[in-house]
Amino acid sequence: MRKLYLVIRSVVLWSASILHFFPACSLLVLLGIFVDPRKNDRPQRILFRNVLRVAGVGFEVRRASGFDPARASIFVCNHVNLFDAFVIYSAIPQFVRGWELESHFKVPAYGWMMKRFGNIPVPNSASLSDLKKLIQRTRAALDGGVSIIVFAEGSRTQDGRVAPFRRGVFNLLPQLGHPIVPMSIVGSFQFKRKGSWMLHPSKIVVHLHDTIETKGLSKQDATELRERVHRIVAAPVHQPLDRP
């Protein structure tokens, strides 16, 4: 009986979410053609927050005392499911955009939308010239007051735990010179798991941890920082999973 309830509940919530998302998203895309997306930030936030409400999930943001909401930063976050974008945009109190594979920008319509909305293309290759472009684009965004979200694991979790972080963004930190903010999404795996369409009753809690300075960071410091940030992000995520 419980399983039948969850199936019916998921069908209803998915239907409601889709009916809400596509008309509202289409309107925002049309607005994006004529209006700078930075001036459309508030309606975008309303849409993304409402998607979570319609999907039936509770939501809370907890800010550490050392989190600086006024500074453009690189937010390093765990990657859970397709709702991550809605969670992140609802939680971060700044204009924020993300890294996205360069190949995604070649997808018809979607690629144009990602470019228009300001996402930063990440090269599929790791050539020196491509990395320089990535550094320049990222630094330009940060200098312009745009915060960046990075999924340092590189893929969505399979078991709810935070996988080891890739070197990627941490190798670039010494050249970017902007602060980073560890960010933990807790409860999202219990709500929706990769490979499953079921939406379970749950509450998502986002932890915005203390802002960490990176000026003067050496390569060795960057390696140690990667491990430190992983521990910070993973701690609240793993806590409910480790309970007996």
Image (cartoon, rainbow, N blue to C red):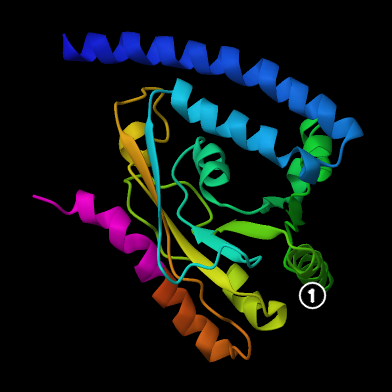
Q: Is residue 150 above or below residue 206?
A: below
Left or right: 42 with respect to 59? right
Query: Going by the picture, which residue comes out furthest to the right?
Result: 34
Left or right: 222 with respect to 210? right
Q: How many marks?
A: 1
Left or right: 235 with respect to 44? left
Residue, x 47% and y 49% (percent of image)? 79
| Residue 115 point in image, percent of width and height | 82, 44
User: What residue would you read off at disc 1?
Assistant: 128
| Residue 167 point in image, percent of width and height | 55, 72
Image-quadrant location for residue 13:
top left
| Residue 101 point in image, percent of width and height | 70, 50
On-image quarter of the N terminus = top left
Of residues 244 and 142, the one drawn nearer to the viewer in this rendering? 142
Q: Is residue 96 magenta?
A: no
| Residue 157 point in image, percent of width and height | 41, 47
Q: Is residue 237 magenta?
A: yes
Q: Residue 153: tell me if it is visible.
A: yes
Of residues 209 and 134, the one drawn nearer to the viewer in this rendering? 209
Q: Is residue 36 above or below residue 21?
A: below
- Secondary structure of residue under mark 1: helix
Residue, x 51% and y 47% (percent of image)? 91
Q: Amino acid at mark 1?
A: Leu
Q: Is residue 66 above or below residue 35?
A: below
Image-quadrant location for residue 242:
bottom left
Q: Residue 117: tell me if it is visible.
A: no
Q: Main secondary structure of the magenta part?
A: helix
Q: Which residues are magenta?
A: 230-244
Residue, x 33% and y 8% (percent of image)? 8
Q: Is residue 125 above or below residue 115?
A: below
Left or right: 198 with respect to 67? left
